[in-house]
Image: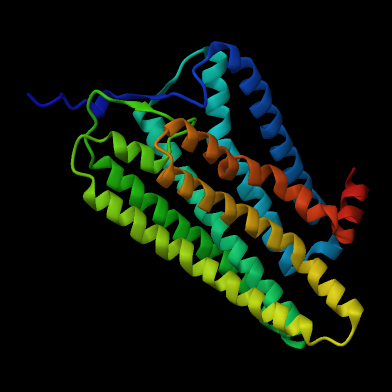
Amino acid sequence: MEPENQTGVAEFLLLGLSEDPEWQPLLFGLFLTMYLVTVLGNLLIILAISSDPHLHTPMYFFLSHLAFTDICFSTTTIPKMLANIQRQTKSISYTGCLTQVGFVLFFAGLENFLLAAMACDRYVAICHPLRYTVIMNPHLCGLLVLLSLSISMADALLHSLMVLRLSFCTDLEIPHFFCELAQVIKLACSDTLINNILVYLVTSILGGVPLLGIIFSYIQIFSSTLKMSSAGGKYKAFSTCGAHLSVVSLFYGTAFGVYISSAVSHSSKDTASASVMYAVVPPMLNPFIYSLRNKDMKGALKKLI
């Protein structure tokens, strides 16, 4: 007898990072602190950029959108985890889980495209400085953000609709602290071949193309920088790109780390722990990276505070 399909009334169980009751207060305090730091740090970045006319440039335009995306990305996963720990429950409704899957995909994709747009901006600024204001005009910047939003939304809707066609039976435990697409697909008792093909195909295209664009931009940037005769010009170019390159390395490095961890490790708990590195840590660290060595940002933050 086939297991009964309970898709219409299913509640998934988020097992979290640890089922040990003694760890729950520590995890609650740790993730609450990380979430508050993420929201406050990125909110300060947005307010500093909006309040300082000197920062109304393409680079900071993209940075403010990245900061907002980081807030939303963290808000998609952490509050539900904290609520479950507080209420001593593991449940998340089918609708809530599907919504979380969609928003995680949307904001992760949006961050991916915004990082590529920022690399493009730095490429034009350093390799074509005389044409920078003409090329990176407000219309193009707005178009790049709109395109990023549209593609990310289409990606999230595609995978969410594909999950809707799946049937879920009795095994509804997700060994994670949020509803991740791959983990949800694994729980289905119907055929998931098309879902898995789409995940690998779409991820390869939407992840690979922006990454190749970033790599190309930085190859051109480093090539142009090395040709500069002025030491001051070289330092300014490297310092301008250093923060963005650090954020790119953190974002893609942690994402690849999670992928390798899931491929090598047979423990779902190890994969869940590794996922913290890309779902929680980058949004928290990005404000510090961008403001650490940026004099303009430091000045704007001092005026704001």
Res. 132 in view: no
Quarter where residue 72 is shown? top right
Indicate the quadrant where residue 118 lies.
Answer: bottom right
| Residue at the (84%, 53%) spot, across then down | 292
User: Is 180 rendered above or below residue 7?
Assistant: below
- Name the residue rendered at 67%, 62% in the picture: 62
**Up/down of 57 relative to 234, above or below:** above
Q: Is residue 283 left or right of residue 252?
A: right
Q: Is residue 238 left or right of residue 285?
A: right
Q: In the rendering, at what x and y percent does residue 186 appear?
A: 30, 38
36 lies above or below 13: below
Residue positioned 79% across, 45% down in the render: 44
217 sits left or right of 196 in the view = right
Q: Residue at x 72, y 68 (%)?
A: 58
Q: Where does the image place residue 269, in percent across and percent down from the top left?
A: 47, 30
Q: Is residue 90 visible?
A: yes
Frontmost residue, 256 versus 214: 256
